[in-house]
């Protein structure tokens, strides 16, 4: 299994409606993919001042699915004009423990 973790910071001008549209577009991605896809997402709780504003964790059964996802039209269409910065990391998880 491949795990894709993203943290992002919104521009100060990002409205609540823009952030909700981003959230809704992400939530719709699993229904648009041709492969198993699980997405967990949410706004930062504000516990630490250095944290990013938002986090996304996406699980893929196969590494190939991740690369397909990166080029998928629904992924490419995610609203990004209100995003200031993005950081990501990918790693493999052995399901046997």
Image: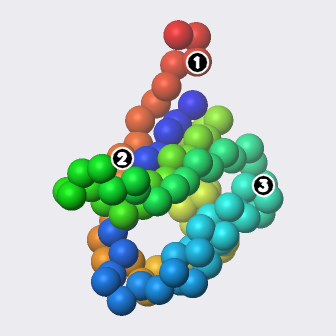
Res. 72 image quadrant: bottom right
Q: Earlier in the sequence, mark 2 or mark 1?
A: 2
Separation of disc 1 and disc 3 at Cα? 22 Å
The image position of residue 63, as x and y in percent, is 55, 40
First along the sequence among labels 1 and 3: 3
Q: Which residue is mark 1?
A: 95
Q: Residues within 10 Å of mark 3 (few under 14, many from 20)?
A: few
**Whether residue 75 can be seen here:** no
Q: Residue at x 74, y 44 (%)?
A: 36
Front label number (1 vs 3): 1
Q: Is residue 73 left or right of residue 76?
A: right
SS state under label 1: loop
Tag of residue 89: 2
Image side of residue 47 versus residue 1, left or right: left
In this rendering, is residue 53 above or below 11? above
| x 66%, y 70%: residue | 24
Q: Position of residue 46 (x, y in %)?
A: 33, 56
Please say if 19 is above or below 23: below
Residue 61's quadrant in the figure? top right
Side of 59 relative to 93 (left or right): right
Relative to residue 55, is residue 20 depicted above or below? below
Q: Which residue is mark 3?
A: 34
Indicate the position of residue 14 as horizontal and vertical percent values.
42, 85
Q: Inspect this view and state whether residue 39 appears.
A: yes
Circle 1 residues within 10 Å: few <14, some 14–19, many ≥20: few
Q: Which mark is residue 24?
A: none
């Amino acid at each position: 299994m491949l795990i894709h973790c993203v943290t992002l910071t919104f521009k100060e001008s990002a409205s609540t409606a823009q952030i909700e549209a981003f959230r809704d577009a992400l939530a719709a991605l699993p229904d648009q993919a041709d492969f198993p896809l699980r997405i967990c997402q949410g706004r930062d709780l504000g516990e630490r001042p250095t944290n990013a504003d938002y986090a996304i964790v996406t699980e893929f059964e196969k590494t190939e699915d991740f690369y397909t996802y990166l080029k998928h039209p629904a992924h490419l269409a995610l609203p990004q004009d209100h995003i200031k910065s993005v950081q990501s990391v990918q790693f493999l998880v052995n399901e046997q423990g």
